Image (cartoon, rainbow, N blue to C red):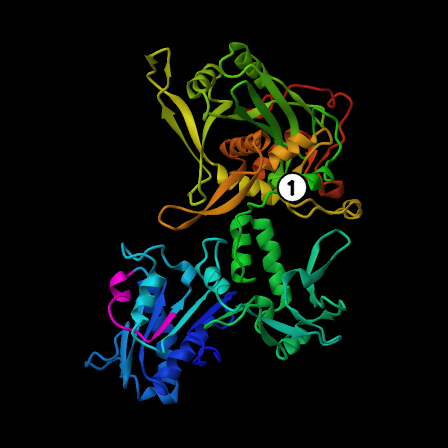
C-alpha cells in the first residue's frame, strides 16, 4: 500500500497466495482516492458476475461502514443514478467496476487509476479486442499521474500474466530475521518440517518452521512475531514498477499444521489438487509435471523380485504397444490399489506392421501368462496399441483378435480435456480397397495428462529402508521398477519434457518436446495407463479391489505397507488358472 501511494511507482504488481490481503489493498486504494484524491477509477474483475459480487459484498459494506465515505457515495436506494452496482459517482470522480470478459466496459472511458484483480483468471481475449489487461491499460494513457495495480494468485508457468508482470518489476520479497540467530531469510516451504510416527504416518500438528541458518524451530507464535520484524528487499533495479511476492507462510491467519494437512491431502489427490496448493498456498506458478525425472536417480530406486513374476500388490495387468517401422515394442504393467504400478515385462517384436509374422507373435503374446506372487497366473486384461503408424494394419489386427482384450488408441495433445480417455468411436477402416461396414473401436487418449501423471509419480518421495522396515507405506501412484531394467529403457522413459511455446497469435501454451529421439518406454507406459483407465481402474469401488485381492489370496496391507500373500494350504497354493475377465 505504501508503493501504491508512491508517485514514483506507476505500476504495482502483487503475486501471492490467496487470502493474504491483495483485495484489501485494492479496497483501501479505492477508499483513499474517493476521500483524499478523487479521480476516475476502474476495477477490473475476471467476469461481470465477479464484478457484481465484488461491488455488493466487498465495496458496498466498506462504503457503508467507513465514516469518511458515507457522505461521498450516494444512497443505493436513491433514483439519481449515482450509485449503481457497477458504476458509482462521488465528488470529483467515479468508480467503474467491469468484467474482463466485457470489451465494451474496458474501452468505454478514460481512467486514471486502474486496479486489476485476479488477472490470471482473465480470458485470453476480451471478445475480438485482444488481451483485456492491455485493453484496459490504454484507458490510462491520457493521465500523467496514472496508477496501474495488478494483483493475482498465479496459475501455469509460462502462461501466467501475474508472473510475467512480476518478472518485469523490481521483484521485492519479504525477508524475516531469525529470533535465535538474527539471520535474514525468505520464508520457503522446504523449511517447514514435521514429524512422522513409528508407523510412518505424518503428524501435521508437529509442524514448525526451521531457520535456514541455525535450524532453530519456530512455532506459529514465534513465526508471526518474526514476520512482524521483517522488511522488503528488491532483487532487481526499480524502473517504475514495484513488484511484491508473498506466500501463505507469512500469513497471520494460517497455522503451519493446517498448511501441512492441505499439502498432504494435495499430494495424495493428484495434479489438480497439487496445482491448487502451489498456486493458492505458495503463490507460485505450476509447471505441468513436465520436468523429466533424472534417469540415474531411477537407477537407485530399482527393486528386486523374480523376473517374469507379479509382486503381491499387483492385482491385474495391462500392456501398451508402440508400433514402429521395423518392430513393435510392448511393456506389461501390473496395477494395484492407489494406482501403484510394477513393470513386469518388456518385449520387442521384430518385423514391423508389414510382416504378418510380427502380428502373429503379438497375438501369441496376448495369451501369455505371468505368475503372481500367490502362485496363480495372470493374463493381460487390456492391451492398448497406438494407431498413429500403419493405422489400417493396426485396425485389421485388432479386429482379428477382438476388441475385448485390445483397445486401439489415438493420442491427443493438450491438457484441457474433460476426460483423459474418451470413446470408443467406430472408425471405418479400409483393407485392400474394401470398405468395411463397421470400423474398429478407437479410443482417444490425452497423452499429455498421462505423461504428466507418470512424471509426478516418478518424482514422489519414497520411504527409506529404515521406514520400510518400520512399516511405512508407499505413496499412491508409486512406480516400481525391477532390477533388470537397463539404462536405455530408463532414458526412454524420461525422454520428454514440458515446455512453454507461443502460438501464432502470441498466446503461450504447454507442449511436450523430446530430449532424445527414442521415447518408446514412455509411450508404452502411457498406453498401458490408458488401458488401465479403459478397464475401469480409476473408477473401481473398494469392493472391486477387495474382490481382486480375494481371488489372488492377497492381504490388503502387509509388511512395509505392501500387499502380501495370505498363507494357504499346499493344495490351494498350486498354480491354477483363474476364470475371470482379468485373469487367464
Residue at 70% from the left image edge and 42% from the top image edge: 297
Quarter of the image containing the C terminus?
Answer: top right
Q: Where is residue 87 in the image (x, y as percent from the top left)?
A: 27, 74
Query: In the figure, 581 relative to 250: above or below?
Result: above
Q: Name the residue under label 1.
A: 478
Snapshot quadrant of residue 69: bottom left
Left or right: residue 349 compared with residue 33: right
Snapshot quadrant of residue 215: bottom right
Whether residue 218 is in magenta: the answer is no
Q: Position of residue 99 (x, y in %)?
A: 32, 64
- Observer-nearest of 134 and 77: 134
Residue at 50% from the left image edge and 54% from the top image edge: 157
Q: Where is residue 108 in the image (x, y as percent from the top left)?
A: 24, 68
Query: In the figure, 406 relative to 127: above or below?
Result: above
How many other residues sit within 10 Å of disc 1, few (<14), some (14-19) or many (≥20)? many
Query: In the figure, 497 relative to 45: above or below?
Result: above
Number of dots carrying numbers:
1
Q: Which stretch did the figure color magenta?
A: 102-115
Left or right: residue 109 compared with residue 43: left
Query: Judging from the image, what secondary structure is the residue with disc 1 in?
Result: loop
Query: In the figure, 300 relative to 357: above or below?
Result: below
Whether residue 107 is in magenta: the answer is yes
Of all residues shown, which one is farthest toward the left? 80
Amino acid at each position: 500500500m505504501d508503493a501504491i501511494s508512491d508517485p514514483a511507482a506507476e505500476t504495482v504488481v502483487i503475486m501471492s497466495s490467496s487470502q493474504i490481503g491483495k483485495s484489501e489493498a485494492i479496497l483501501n486504494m479505492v477508499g483513499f482516492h474517493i476521500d483524499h484524491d478523487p479521480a476516475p477509477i476502474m476495477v477490473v474483475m475476471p467476469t461481470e458476475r465477479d464484478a457484481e459480487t465484488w461491488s455488493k459484498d466487498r465495496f458496498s459494506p466498506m462504503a457503508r461502514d467507513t465514516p469518511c465515505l458515507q457522505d461521498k457515495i450516494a444512497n443505493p436506494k436513491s433514483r439519481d443514478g449515482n450509485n449503481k452496482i457497477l458504476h458509482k459517482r462521488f465528488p470529483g470522480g467515479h468508480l467503474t467496476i467491469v468484467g474482463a470478459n466485457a470489451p465494451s466496459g474496458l474501452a468505454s472511458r478514460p481512467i486514471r487509476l486502474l486496479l486489476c484483480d485476479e488477472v490470471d483468471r482473465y480470458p485470453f481475449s476480451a471478445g475480438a479486442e485482444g488481451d483485456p489487461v492491455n485493453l484496459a491499460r490504454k484507458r490510462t494513457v491520457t493521465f500523467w499521474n496514472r496508477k496501474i495495480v495488478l494483483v493475482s494468485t498465479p496459475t501455469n508457468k509460462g502462461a501466467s500474466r501475474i508472473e510475467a508482470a512480476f518478472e518485469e518489476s523490481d521483484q521485492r520479497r519479504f525477508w524475516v530475521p531469525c529470533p535465535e540467530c538474527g539471520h535474514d531469510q525468505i520464508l520457503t516451504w522446504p523449511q517447514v518440517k514435521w514429524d512422522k510416527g513409528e508407523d510412518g504416518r505424518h503428524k501435521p500438528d508437529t509442524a514448525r518452521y526451521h531457520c535456514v541458518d541455525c535450524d532453530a524451530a519456530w512455532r506459529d507464535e514465534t513465526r508471526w512475531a518474526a514476520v512482524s520484524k521483517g522488511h522488503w528487499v528488491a532483487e532487481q533495479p526499480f524502473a517504475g514498477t514495484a513488484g511484491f511476492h508473498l506466500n501463505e507462510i507469512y500469513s497471520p491467519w494460517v497455522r503451519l499444521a493446517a498448511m501441512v494437512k492441505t499439502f498432504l491431502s494435495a499430494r495424495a489427490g493428484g495434479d489438480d489438487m497439487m496445482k491448487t496448493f502451489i498456486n493458492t498456498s505458495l503463490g507460485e506458478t505450476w509447471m505441468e509435471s513436465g520436468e523429466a525425472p533424472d534417469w540415474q536417480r531411477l537407477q537407485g530406486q530399482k527393486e528386486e523380485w523374480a523376473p517374469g513374476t507379479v509382486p503381491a500388490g499387483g492385482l491385474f495387468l495391462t500392456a501398451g504397444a508402440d508400433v514402429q517401422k521395423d518392430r513393435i515394442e510392448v511393456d506389461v504393467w501390473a496395477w494395484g490399489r492407489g494406482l501403484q504400478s510394477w513393470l513386469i515385462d518388456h518385449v520387442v517384436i521384430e518385423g514391423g506392421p508389414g510382416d504378418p509374422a510380427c502380428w502373429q507373435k503379438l497375438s501369441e503374446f496376448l495369451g501369455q501368462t505371468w505368475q503372481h506372487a500367490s502362485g496363480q497366473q495372470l493374463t493381460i486384461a487390456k492391451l492398448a496399441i497406438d494407431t498413429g503408424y500403419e493405422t489400417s494394419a493396426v485396425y485389421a489386427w485388432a479386429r482379428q483378435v477382438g476388441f475385448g482384450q485390445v483397445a486401439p488408441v489415438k493420442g491427443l495433445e493438450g491438457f484441457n480435456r474433460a476426460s483423459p480417455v474418451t470413446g470408443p468411436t467406430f472408425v471405418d477402416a479400409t483393407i485392400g480397397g474394401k470398405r468395411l461396414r463397421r470400423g474398429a473401436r478407437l479410443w482417444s487418449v490425452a497423452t499429455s495428462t498421462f505423461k504428466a501423471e507418470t512424471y509426478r509419480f516418478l518424482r514422489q518421495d519414497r520411504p527409506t529402508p529404515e521406514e520400510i522396515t518400520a512399516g511405512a507405506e508407499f505413496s499412491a501412484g508409486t512406480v516400481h521398477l525391477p532390477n533388470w531394467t537397463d539404462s536405455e529403457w530408463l532414458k526412454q522413459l524420461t525422454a520428454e519434457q514440458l515446455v512453454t511455446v507461443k502460438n501464432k497469435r502470441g498466446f503461450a501454451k504447454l507442449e511436450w518436446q523430446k530430449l532424445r529421439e527414442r521415447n518408446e518406454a514412455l509411450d508404452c507406459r502411457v498406453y498401458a495407463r490408458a488401458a488401465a483407465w479403459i478397464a475401469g481402474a480409476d473408477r473401481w469401488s473398494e469392493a472391486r479391489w477387495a474382490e481382486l485381492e480375494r481371488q489372488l489370496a492377497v492381504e490388503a496391507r502387509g509388511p512395509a505397507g505392501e500387499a502380501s500373500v495370505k498363507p494357504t494350504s499346499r493344495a490351494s497354493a498350486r498354480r491354477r488358472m483363474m476364470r475371470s475377465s482379468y485373469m487367464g
